[in-house]
Structures are given as C-alpha cells and as structure tokens.
Amino acid sequence: MLSPVVFSILLISVAAFFTFHAKKIRRNILIGKDIDLTANKGERTKTMLKVAFGQSKMVVRPIPGIMHFFIYAAFVITQIELLEIVIDGVSGGHRRIWHAIDGTALSGLYTFTINFIEILSVLAFIATITFLSRRNIIRLARFQKPEMKGWPTKDANLILCAEIFLITCIMMMNSADLELQARGETMRTASFIISSNFQNIFSGMDSSTVHLFERIGWWGHIMGIFGFLVYLPISKHLHILLAFPNTYYSNLKLKGEFSTLEAVTDVVAPNFDPAYKPKTDPNNPVRFGAKDVHDLSWKNLLDAYTCTECGRCTSACPQNITGKKLSPRKIMMDTRDRLTEVGKNMDANGGKFVDDGRSLLGDFITTEEIWACNTCNACVQECPVNIDPLEIILEMRRFLVMEQSQSPAELNNMFSNIENNGAPWQFSQADRANWTKEQ
Amino acid sequence: MSDKIIKVKTMAEMTAAGETPEILFWVGCSGSFDDRAKKITKAIVRILDHVGIKFAILGSEEGCSGDPAKRAGNEFLYQMQAMQNITTLNMYNVKKIVTGCPHCFNTIKNEYPSLGGNYEIVHHTQLVQELINTGKLKVQGGEFKGKKIVFHDPCYLGRANNVYEAPRDIIQKLDVELAEMKRSRANGLCCGAGGAQMFKEAEKGTKEVSTERAEEALSNDPDIIAVGCPFCNTMMTDGVKHFNKENKTKVLDVAELIAKANDL
Ligand code: SF4
Ligand code: SF4
C-alpha cells in the first residue's frame, strides 16, 4: 500500500506550499493603503455573481467569451471528479463514490456528472486549441504587444498545454477503465459518452498494460492539478481565484467620479471655511499620489494580482491603438512585478521592506506612459474582472504634479491659466460672458 | 439659425432684480471662449429661450470646473476651483444646472458633492430630451430630414455617466438616418481630448487619436458627425479636416442640430 502514503504526502505538501504562497500574496496585497470597501454587501455580491461567476463581461467578445466559458465550466465541474480522485488516492481505492452509491438512485447522477464532465472536457479541449492558435498561429495583435515578450507569453502557452494534458489524462483514465470493466477486471459503471469511443484503442493490449494506462491517466491528472497549484502563485492564472474577491470589491460608483483627496481638502478648505475641521491626521502626513506600490490602495494591488494579461484593456485604449507607449495591461503587469519584488525584499529582510532605491514609477512605469492617458475609462469598461488601471495612472499623475512639480510644460501653462484666469486658456475671467453680446 | 441676439442675464443681475431662474446654464470655459464652442452655447441659449425657461448664467463669476486640473493630477488646483465655484453656486442658492460640457457635467455631478456642492445637474441633451418628451419642445427634421448622422459618444457623458440614449433619442426625432460606429456607446472610442490631452502635444506614436476616431466616423460616409461635447467637437473637426472631408461631412453639436432644424 505504497501509493496512498505517497499520495497523501504529496497532497499535504502541495496544500502546505500553496497556503504558504497564498499567505505571502495576501501580505503583499495588504502593503497597500487601507480603503474601506465593506459597504453595500448586497450589490457587491451581485456584481461578483454577475461578472466573475456569470462571466458577463467575457461574452462581449463572443468567440473568446464562449470558448473561455467552456474551459471555465469544465474546470469548475471537474472538481467533482477530482473529489473522487482525492478520496481514491488517500484511501487507495477505485471509484469510491460510485462504489458507495452503486445501485441507489444516486448512481444515475454519477453517470450524468461524469458524462457532463466529459462533454465539457471536449469543448474545453476545442477551446484550448483555439486559444493556442489565436496566440501562436493567427497571432492576434493584443497578444503580441511589447509587454507580452518572454515570460508572459510562455506562461499563457504553458497553462494552455497543461489544460490539454489534464483533459487527455482524464480521457485516458476513463477509457482504459471502461476497457478493464468490459473485461471484468474492475467494478462496472455505466458507459461514458466520450471516453467509450476511445475504448477500442486498448482492445489489443493485455490487461496489465491497460491497467498501466489507466494509472498513468489517473496519476497524470492529479499530478497536473498539483503542478497547477504549485505554479499558480507565480502565474497570471491567479485570476481563477482572485476574480471573485476582485469583482466583489469592484468600484460601485460611476466611472466618471475620481476620488477626492481628503489631505488636500484639509489644506484648501480652511481658505473658504475658517471653521473647517481637518479630516486627516496632521502628525501623519501622507504622500500625495503614488510613486511606489506602498502608495497605492490594497484594491489596486489586488487588481494587479488578478490581471490575466488578456489585453482587452490595451486593445480598447485610444492611446495604445494609435501607437503610443501607454498600455493599461502593462500598468497592471508592472504593478504586480514591482509588488513581487517588494515582497521578496521583505522576505530577505525579516518581513520588513528595506529601501532598494527602486520604485514602480521610474523603474517600471515611465512618465511618458503616465502623461499619455485620456482618462477615458475604456480600459476599465473592457476588463472582464473589473480591474481599474486608470486609478493607478491618476495616482501617479498626482505624485508627479503635487510632490515633484514635474508635469509637461504645456500642462503647467494650463494650470497657471486656471489659477490666474479661471480658464485653461489665457482669457480674462472678466470676459467670460462676452459671447452674450456677439451674434 | 437666426442672428438675433438673445438677452442673457447673469445670476447677479437676476438677484439684483429680485428674480430667481428655474435653471442655471453652466457655460464652461470652452463654451465661453472657444469660437466654435460659442456657437454651441448660443444654440443652447436659443433652445432655452424658445421654450421659455427662465435661466441665468454666472458670467464672470463662473470659473473652470477644475476637470482638466483634476485629470492632470493637480488636486490642489482642482479643489481651489471647485470650492470657489461651490461658494458662488451656494451663495445664489442654485438648485438646478444645465451644461453643454460633459466634463463640467461629470465634475459638478459626481465630484462636487464631496466638497459640499449638491445640485441637480443635467447635460443639455438630457434637458432637450425631457423638453421633447413633455411636449414643451416640438422638433422637426427641417434641413436635416433624410440626412445620415453618426453620433460620437463623449467619454464623460457615456462611459463615465451612462448617458447613451438621450442624444440618440433627440437625433432620431429629426427624421434622419442615425448610423452607429462599430465602437459606440460603452465601447466608444475617445476623441483624444480627455484627461487634459487637449492642452498638450500627444506622446510619440503612429497617429493622432482624433484621426483614428474621425476615420471610423467617416467610414459610415455620414453627412453629419453629431457630438455632445465642445472638446469632441474640436477633435472631430480636426479629424475630418485631416481627411479633407470638411465639405462633405459637418461636425455639429446635438444642440446645434435642434436649433438649426427648428430655425431657432
Ligand atoms: S483611461 Fe487611459 S489607459 Fe485607460 S483606455 Fe483610456 S487612455 Fe488608455
Ligand atoms: S487589466 Fe483586465 S483587461 Fe487588462 S489585461 Fe488585465 S485582466 Fe485583461
């Protein structure tokens, strides 16, 4: 009975490894500034169910939307079969759930579920092949942008290949098992709709070989899942988990409303209202805007870990479409990369961040990108998991203007015009109603 | 449009005469100073005058809403402007505002409340829609009957505030063929002016955003590109000129369409 022991040790190690990394990611996200997003639980839950669970923003682009839905549904529903695999693995049994319910009314449900999984697996297989060809053969523009060079492209392809591997394994497992059942070697289940078609591949083999294939399928599938869990924390695929909290904490306000900086209000308001009471703590001055990940909110950082690098945002960005450097996807990828770097720095220094002379703005994101933005919200609208790249861009502008006085000269002119004349151009405020006298 | 000058009163004048307007017309910087945008301002005035709404402007007491400063990251300057304007608006006890500029609309509607400015504000297309729906304004196609019109969604009216139907509703009342661009409504493409880009050169790239957008609008071969924002108007006009199509395709604000069609 070696295999249950090996299996259990593997299962516990993978779970421990995953928990260890999940905690680190949580710690990294909480480096961000606190914001209170606890209100409106009902609306938040609704948004999460609609956008993450119901994938409402994916179907805007029907082909990838439906294809992605196949993979997503197959992934979710396969967890039921995975449950049996884990039970069998720990106990050293075979199809324990079926064993427990065989002959009862529930056996029909078992067969239905396995068949359902098999059909979805085929659809997911087609989807995966489609996705691989969109990236590597058709070479859709949004997957070929500069920020996708190297690791991000490999990451995406690796996951898609792993998907094919997982589906192949489970099909192999089921069809070899059906052949063994036909020979009376294992307990009989009902026939399975897809894998039964591959059963005759094994007909010429002796039973021990067929059994070996069944085991390869079984172990391959579960090892694939374990591998996936180990790989998840360093990949863009965290979205399969984080899409849920990220959409739950979506911005519920109108997209046009940008945050009001209270620390600024505390400085400005006394000019208008001498009785004004400051809202922020004057002994604890905050940096205006954001230079590094520490200055962003935890939601911005959760956004960064949730980003799937799909590039829908970038393909809708007017500045990127017209050849500018700005790419909202890159803003999110840079934020994540810097956050990972900061996390490693903390690990190496006993949990405390030690200044490394680097920052998100400058070492990752350039001012050229920051100043190009139209604040048009197209990226926010497009994102299938409700990420807000614009907020990060705005915070960096705030830092550049209010902490560094580093805005483009033309914008400085605009500022001084507003300050002096109450209009962004050099017209006198006294002439504001002159048009009423013109024809 | 007729050439008659309509007497527009300021809040100060009305208050001095002991009068209260039903609505304040927030003109905005572009509408006050830009030659092209002033025509839109006057079209709005003609509509207000025609339906007999008692309205006033702030005149020299109006200041930039602060939108370009805020979007460019200058929160200090934005809040100075906002608080100045809020002080003025509250002093006159303003309750209802109409504006022709989606940027002013967005800022006053969504960002002034947290600084103590609470008003009911509508974009002029919303007001016109309401006037038509309540029978106060009758519109006919006039010179636009049968023309092909494509509407460009301003980001700060559309995506920012989910106002997509009001301008389309009005345009359709003119007996025209309303065409849609592929990127429209929530997927509309920016004209290139927002986020304070209006006031600076673009970063290095392959194209101007306004060219990209105008190209898309012109691919419908429209007689008119309708807009609802003075900045979009500037950008789309530039874009149309880029393709030398200014003789075939005009860029007009929805307010201008209404005023012209009805000879106001
Ligand atoms: S808001 Fe800025 S980054 Fe986002 S799509 Fe518009 S221009 Fe691009
Ligand atoms: S921000 Fe959203 S739309 Fe953009 S790449 Fe990431 S997941 Fe895709």
Image (cartoon, rainbow, N blue to C red):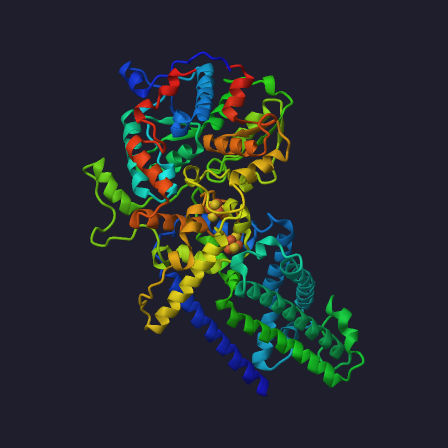
Q: Residue at x 48, y 28 (%)?
A: B126
Q: Residue at x 37, y 55 (%)?
A: A297
Residue B32, can we see it? Answer: yes
Q: Relative to residue A58, is residue A37 drawn left or right?
A: left
Against A170, is B60 above or below? Answer: above
Q: Which residue reaches farthest top?
A: B4
Q: Which residue reaches farthest right?
A: A204
Which quarter shows the C terminus of chain A?
top left
Q: Position of residue A2 (x, y in %)?
A: 58, 87
Against A263, is A117 above or below? Answer: below
Q: Position of residue A360 (x, y in %)?
A: 39, 58
Figure quadrant of residue A64: bottom right
Figure quadrant of residue A331: bottom left
Residue A96, can we see it? Answer: no
Which quarter shows the N terminus of chain A?
bottom right
Q: Position of residue A190 (x, y in %)?
A: 73, 70
**How many marks on residues?**
0
Q: Relative to residue A269, is residue B161 drawn left or right?
A: right
| Most foreground residue, A279 or A420 | A420
Against A143, is A319 above or below? Answer: above
Q: Position of residue A200 (x, y in %)?
A: 79, 74
Q: Residue at x 72, y 76 (%)?
A: A176
Q: Which residue reaches farthest left?
A: A274
Q: Relative to residue A278, is residue A14 drawn left or right?
A: right
| Most foreground residue, B207 or B127 | B207
Against A77, is B198 above or below? Answer: above
